[in-house]
Amino acid sequence: MTLCADFDALRASAADVRIVTSDGQSIAAHSCVLASASPVLERMIDRARRGWGADCTIRVLGVSFDAVRAFLHFLYSAKVAPEEEELVGAHGAQLLALAHAYRVGWLKRAAEAAVSARLTPERAVDMLKLARLCDARRLYLHCARLAAKDFSAVERSDGWRFARRHDAALQLELLQLLEDADQRKERWARERAAQEACRQLGEAMASLDHIFPSDGPARGDAPCDKAGCTCRGLQLLMRHFATCARKAAPGGCARCKRMLQLFRLHASVCDRPDKACRVPLCSHFKAKAQTEKEDKTWRLLVKKVTRAKVMSSLADRKVVPEVVVMSWTMYNGRVAKLR
Ligand SMILES: [Zn+2]
Ligand SMILES: [Zn+2]
Ligand SMILES: [Zn+2]
């Protein structure tokens, strides 16, 4: 391969293959370069040589002369130099098709990346079709994502209009991709909402620890000195719980039910000895959990809230390990995007 790498020097030596393009023009080339770069071209050269006469002609049709020339240039140099990325971009789709057809893997990847980088909604349908034909998975996914993101622009494109008129299968495939993307988005939103709920519950558990410290008297209604905590809301809820007349009424009171759930959750995550914990109903719920088996959903919730509570308390410390800061930022960052 290195022997044949000098394109110009080789050009000076006797070319033994003629590449003919769609417009009838021909380019002289060297069989050793082509055969070593592409197993498909190697077979074609072999077959042509076994035919009548010494002439070895290969027809590369369906793409422009300039694209074929660029393709040959890359076969000779066996790499895409950084300053040649523009050339790949200029013939991206055609190079992708050629590299796929002639099985030049490294060039196919370079062309796929160049096409993906220059993708616009107007070309998304055409490039999706090409990606499917060339088995270019990354480009295919990129087109699908772009179509889901900006479908109104895709709808105005010639590619989409053509698909609607002549290619029902492609139209169906695109609509399916959009539906999948919608479902993925919904799933993400659900997961994020659940994560946010766990984060809030983790904060509530930390607040219960602030209000009922293990090493001192209960704080009651006194303001909390921990920065950024949510004790106030919980203190108000507890005051309501203490005085609510509808607590035991039929149907109950939604706020009191929530308070009871928080006390139960606290008991599930509480690691203090029974007598040392002053959180209301802690020992009652702990005893209940011993006799009644908690269901799977509750156990999963407890696990998630315990993790959220640990993350919250670690992030409150003055000296925090970097890994915790990063996880906490990621955890909150994702939640923050939802708001
Ligand atoms: Zn607090
Ligand atoms: Zn109530
Ligand atoms: Zn407790």
Image (cartoon, rainbow, N blue to C red):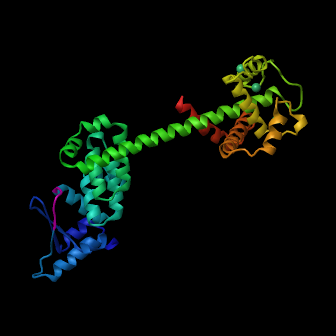
Question: Relative to residue 333, is residue 83 depicted above or below?
Answer: below
Quarter in which the N terminus is drawn: bottom left
Q: Residue at x 80, y 40 (%)?
A: 288
**What residue is shown at x 76% (from left), y 40% (from top)?**
268
* Residue in the picture at 24% in, 42% down: 160
**Which quadrant: the C terminus?**
top right
Q: Is residue 8 visible?
A: yes
> Is residue 52 within the magenta segment?
no
Near-viewer residue (138 or 285): 285
Tell me if residue 318 can be seen: no
**Residue that extends furthest to the front in the rendered view of this protein:** 250
Q: Quadrant of ligand 1?
A: top right
Q: Majority secondary structure of the magenta segment?
A: loop
Tell me where residue 171 appears, x and y as whole percent. Answer: 26, 46
Q: Give coordinates of residue 101: x percent, y percent.
A: 26, 64
Q: Which region shows up in magenta?
A: 59-64
Image position, residue 40 (x, y; %)? 26, 71
